[in-house]
Image (tube, helix red, strand yellow):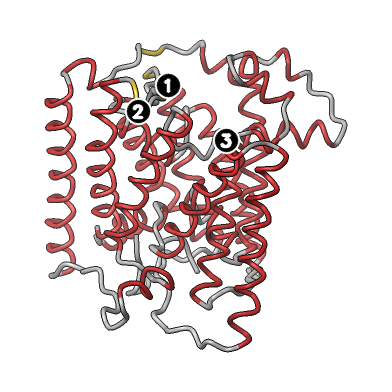
Amino acid sequence: MPSGTRPIVTTPIFTARYFIPLSIVTLLCITAFFWIAKIESWHEARLLMLGTALGLALYHAAFGFTTAWRTFVTHGQGKGLRAQMLMLSVAVCLFFPALAAGDLLGTNISGFVRPLGWSIVIGAFIFGIGMQLGNGCASGNLYHAGGGQLRAIPSMLGFTVGALWATKDYEWWTTLPQLAPYSFIEAFGLVPALIIHLSVFAFITWITLRIEKRRNGSIDKDTHDTSLPLHRQLLLGPWPFIWGAVALAVLNFMTLAMIGRPWAVALAYPLWGAKAAEWLNIDLELDFWTYWMQPGRESALMEPLTSDAGTLMNVGIIMGALLAASLAGKLTIQWRMPWPHWIAAVIGGLMLGYGATIAFGCNIGAYFSGIASGSLHGWLWLVAAFLGSMIGTLIRPLFKLSNLTATNTRC
């Protein structure tokens, strides 16, 4: 299933072929939760559960960024972009008051407010190209892999290598000219910052409607099967995109409450690369790289991955997609694809990893969580990544990747 493509609406046939894999996957998830709780603590186990909820929401809502952007560029269909604007609208309404207070349920919190520089512009642009070649973004590849698409793994491996490579060059990127971080909440205050953001989201939504109506003559509405009872649709999917948008915003807010910072996917990949190099006995002298000298990162190198919040949540996304695919009765292993697609996946993955690391995050950490944090760098990342995505869309046919979009495309 391509990134952002809505699954065909079918009701699972409740036979042994349905319940056996579902039982195995459910047992696997429960075992993983208790195992993490035993070797670490229930805090880490809850992070794994939170990631699982994110993976289930991503899969059931077929919520992605790659196809949404490509569909708007190639066909003028903005349903996916409008879903993202809804997600961001809910997020800022939750995030801004909490960030203005600096405290959430007794936890000191802070958003992602980053400097504005060339590293974001170039990194996000590279990421935008990579997400089209790799046929998935940071979160998309995780839930695709969990849903049985092993074709996402080459992109994830490339992401890991590219991210580690970027940590070596990180010091050079920090020497480029940049402006100080800019927070709309601090600059304008809570209510004006909310009004500004909600107005921009509404304007972008209006633009997509105008373009879609002009290019296609009508507005593509989000259709879903309303004949199923609500609880069955919630459990088995697929979800209307509004459910996915609201769920992701709320779950990101829960992440802020649990670990004091918003949701981020790309943060785990450099650490995975460093751990892999250590496991392979490759001495890279990471202690002398500027990236790993920053607070929290050097200690992460010394601690097991089971204590890393980013790793736990990313693994949880895979588990959640695996569970969602089992619940929907659509768990199948898909790995065959033409060799040009494999090459595109690896190249795209390298660009995703390198771009995300120098740009302070991916479509989740920089775009979603950056804008939800009221940071101007999130908007800068969005513009640069969207331009890169346009270039990536033009390059896709060189690797035999189609830009045709099915009529059932979701966000």
SS category of the residue bearing label 1 = helix
Give amino acid for label 3.
Ala
The quadrant holding residue 199 is top left
* Residue lying at 34% horizontally and 46% vertically, measured from the top left: 250
**N-term mark: 3 or 2:** 2
**N-term mark: 3 or 1:** 1
* Residue lying at 66% horizontally and 64% vertically, measured from the top left: 27
Query: What percent of the width, then of the height, locates residue 175?
Result: 51, 10
Q: Which residue is mark 3?
A: 309
Q: Is residue 254 left or right of residue 230?
A: right
Q: Which of labels 3 and 2 is toward the front?
A: 2
Callout 1 crowding tier (Cα within 10 Å): few <14, some 14–19, many ≥20: some
**In the rendered view, would you say 113 is above or below 163?**
above
Assess whether mark 2 and mark 3 are in contact (beta carbons under 8 angstroms). Answer: no
Mark 3 → mark 1, Cα distance in angstroms: 28 Å
In the picture, the disc for residue 409 is none
Assess whether mark 2 and mark 1 are in contact (beta carbons under 8 angstroms). Answer: no
Mark 1 → mark 2, Cα distance in angstroms: 33 Å
SS category of the residue bearing label 3 = helix
Query: What percent of the width, then of the height, locates residue 253?
Result: 36, 39
Farthest right residue in view? 281
Q: Which residue is mark 1?
A: 118
Callout 2 crowding tier (Cα within 10 Å): few <14, some 14–19, many ≥20: some
Q: Which residue is mark 2?
A: 104
